[in-house]
Amino acid sequence: MELTLAKSQGYLRGNASASSGKKLLAVIGAYTGFGSHLKRNVFCGSWMPTGDALKTLEERGVIIRFLIGRSANRGDSLDSNIDEENHRTKDFLILESHEEATEEVPRKAKFFFSAAVEMWEAEFYVKVDDNINLQIDALIEILESRRGSQGLYMGCMKSGSVITEEGKQWYEPEWWKFGDSKTYFRHASGSLFILSNNLARYINTNR
């Protein structure tokens, strides 16, 4: 999408959302996988509410869902088990366009932000990994203080050297794109990061 069109439709800094009415505060997506049932139980036994408590949190303007894609073999037992679990718990956001596979993990966040911004109008969209013990009340307090923020990209920021040697862990096949310094630009750690509404919309438009 051209920059001028992005600006006209409110996807960049300084442009209000096209939707009217009060937004939700946040949509939180927690990564999960087909073999992570026990991890989901740990989540639900620690910081993630269930049942009526989940509904109460939603009344406060915070949506939490487990994020998962579809099996490479659509409709198999992996898919049906997730569908059955979601029917019981109603706490999944199933990313129909995403294949749940190790090599597809880098694309999962894009599919989450795209799907979430189409389903819910929120101030912020939060991605968390399944090994995070989130202090939900503290997060809500931080986000409440930043309502109305545009162009917000927040998390545990880091940078570091690009791995250029093939075969090493975290090898970067396109290392040459990072210039002579071979250093990643400062970015949020993948474990948890937050985007404001307009940035999530920009991702959705350019997916």
Image (cartoon, rainbow, N blue to C red):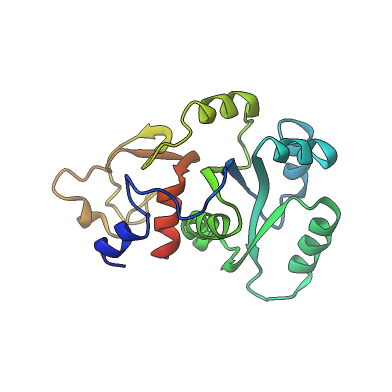
The furthest residue to the left: 180
Measured along the vertical axis of the image, is residue 157 above or below residue 99? above
Residue found at x 31% / y 67%: 1
Residue found at x 20% / y 56%: 176
Report the quarter where the C terminus lies.
bottom left
Q: Quadrant of residue 43?
A: top right
Q: Quadrant of residue 134?
A: top right
Name the side, left or right, on which 163 lies relative to 207. left
Q: How many marks?
A: 0
Instruction: Please name whichever residue, 143 or 50, is drawn nearer the observer in this view of the structure.
Output: 143
Q: Position of residue 42 (x, y in %)?
A: 76, 37
Q: Would you say residue 79 is visible in this rendering?
A: yes
Residue found at x 65% / y 39%: 62
Q: Position of residue 41 (x, y in %)?
A: 79, 41
Instruction: Please name whichever residue, 109 or 146, is drawn nearer the observer in this view of the structure.
Output: 146
Name the side, left or right, on which 39 lies relative to 99. right
The furthest residue to the front: 20
Q: Would you say residue 169 is visible in this rendering?
A: no
Name the side, left or right, on which 111 lies relative to 96. left
Measured along the vertical axis of the image, is residue 4 above or below residue 17? below
Residue found at x 82% / y 50%: 89
Instruction: Please name whichever residue, 18 or 34, is drawn nearer the observer in this view of the structure.
Output: 18
Measured along the vertical axis of the image, is residue 105 above or below residue 136? below
Q: Quadrant of residue 101?
A: bottom right
Q: Position of residue 40 (x, y in %)?
A: 74, 44
Q: Position of residue 93 (x, y in %)?
A: 67, 56
